[in-house]
Image (cartoon, helix red, strand yellow):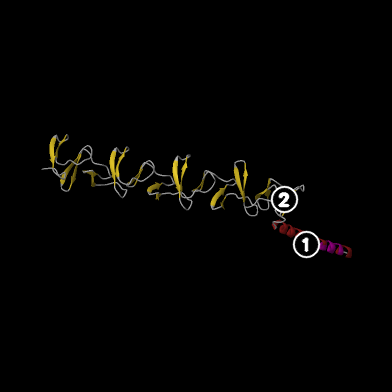
């Protein structure tokens, strides 16, 4: 290598180093610029404070702007400033712009003591489920109230924590209700030894006729059906068999004696009864005991 080639290569290497330093400086400056809210570049323009200049230099107003750096939508109002901490209504839809102007999406927003849910498109949900919570006609999360869902043709109850009741008993205004898995209100059904009527309220005390089983049951004061026991009601004794079924037109062996329950479930007492099965007459003393 001659002296000319040596100096030529050395100069080119120095130029390359200086060029790389300049590129690095420009890259770092660009990163700093993008990280600054005052100077962040948006999709087609630049932020200047709370205002947005489009690529052609005109000022945005009454329009949406998507900022690729922040990956968020912003709404520029008529005064050319972005909306923040406020609702925006467009057509039938509501949007919420948070502090800094970011559009809320896929999240809950609290406003004046109520909670609202904004979906993935930023639209406020109404009359819809959000997980196990429900938002009503105004969009506010329902708290401690009933919800009827026509899609499921069922009632649900939203508790104080904003979640629907599920697999549990709840006492609401003095009445007990049971909610199944999924939160559905149980109606006209048995739940263990208790029964809930057509409105879902637990039957407290009295007679209950179940069409499915074609039998009478007696619900005691504790809300459970009588089972393998005598019930005294309106001057008459009745016997409730295993499973709670009322005995009728049949014999019951109890207390070392036979008793007979007539067609209406009343215990025979101080009277003769003809048994068609044995084709014989029997007399029952006071207390229902059969005479030997």
Q: Nearer the viewer, mark 1 or mark 2?
A: 2
Give the residue at x 76% y 61%: 25
Residue marked by disc 1: 21
Please identify the dominant SS of the magenta region. helix
- Residue 97 visible in the picture: no
Give the residue at x 85% y 63%: 11
Residue sticking out furthest to the left: 292
Residue 30 horizontal side relative to residue 260, left or right: right
Give the secondary structure at mark 2. strand
Q: Which residue is more in the foreground, 143 or 283? A: 143
- Residue 283 visible in the picture: yes
Q: Position of residue 22 (x, y in %)?
A: 78, 60
State yes or no: residue 8 in magenta: yes
Q: Which of the marked residues, 1 or 2, is nearer the chain's N terminus?
A: 1
* Residue 112, above or below 3: above
Q: Which residue is more in the foreground, 2 or 98? A: 98
Q: Position of residue 32 (x, y in %)?
A: 72, 59
Give the residue at x 54% y 51%: 115
Give the secondary structure at mark 1. helix
Residue marked by disc 2: 52
Query: For the magenta stretch, what is the residue range?
Result: 7-14
- Locate the N terminus by quadrant: bottom right
Residue 83 horizontal side relative to residue 250, left or right: right
């Amino acid at each position: 290598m001659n002296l000319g080639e040596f100096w030529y290569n050395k100069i080119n290497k120095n130029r390359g180093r200086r060029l790389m330093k300049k590129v690095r400086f420009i890259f770092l400056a660009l990163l700093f610029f993008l990280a600054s809210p005052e100077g962040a570049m948006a999709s087609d323009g630049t932020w200047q404070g709370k205002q947005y200049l489009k690529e052609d230099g005109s000022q945005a107003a009454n329009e949406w702007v998507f900022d690729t750096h922040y990956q968020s939508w912003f709404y520029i109002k008529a005064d050319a400033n972005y909306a923040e901490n406020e609702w925006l209504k467009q057509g039938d839809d509501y949007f919420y712009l948070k502090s800094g102007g970011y559009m809320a999406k896929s999240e809950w927003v609290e406003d004046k003591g109520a909670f609202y849910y904004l979906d993935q498109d930023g639209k406020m949900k109404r009359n819809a489920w959000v997980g196990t919570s429900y938002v009503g006609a105004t969009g506010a999360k329902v708290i401690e109230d009933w919800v009827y869902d026509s899609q499921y043709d069922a009632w649900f109850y939203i508790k104080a924590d904003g979640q629907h009741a599920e697999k549990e008993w709840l006492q609401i205004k003095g009445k007990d209700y049971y909610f199944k898995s999924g939160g559905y209100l149980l109606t006209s059904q048995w739940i263990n030894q208790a029964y809930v009527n057509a409105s879902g309220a637990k039957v407290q005390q009295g007679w209950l006729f179940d069409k499915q089983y074609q039998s009478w049951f007696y619900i005691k004061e504790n809300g459970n059906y009588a089972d393998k026991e005598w019930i005294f009601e309106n001057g008459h004794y009745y016997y409730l068999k295993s499973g709670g079924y009322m005995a009728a037109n049949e014999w019951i062996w109890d207390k070392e004696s036979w008793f007979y329950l007539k067609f209406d479930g009343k215990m025979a007492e101080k009277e003769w009864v003809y048994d068609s099965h044995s084709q014989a007459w029997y007399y029952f003393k006071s207390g229902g005991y059969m005479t030997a």
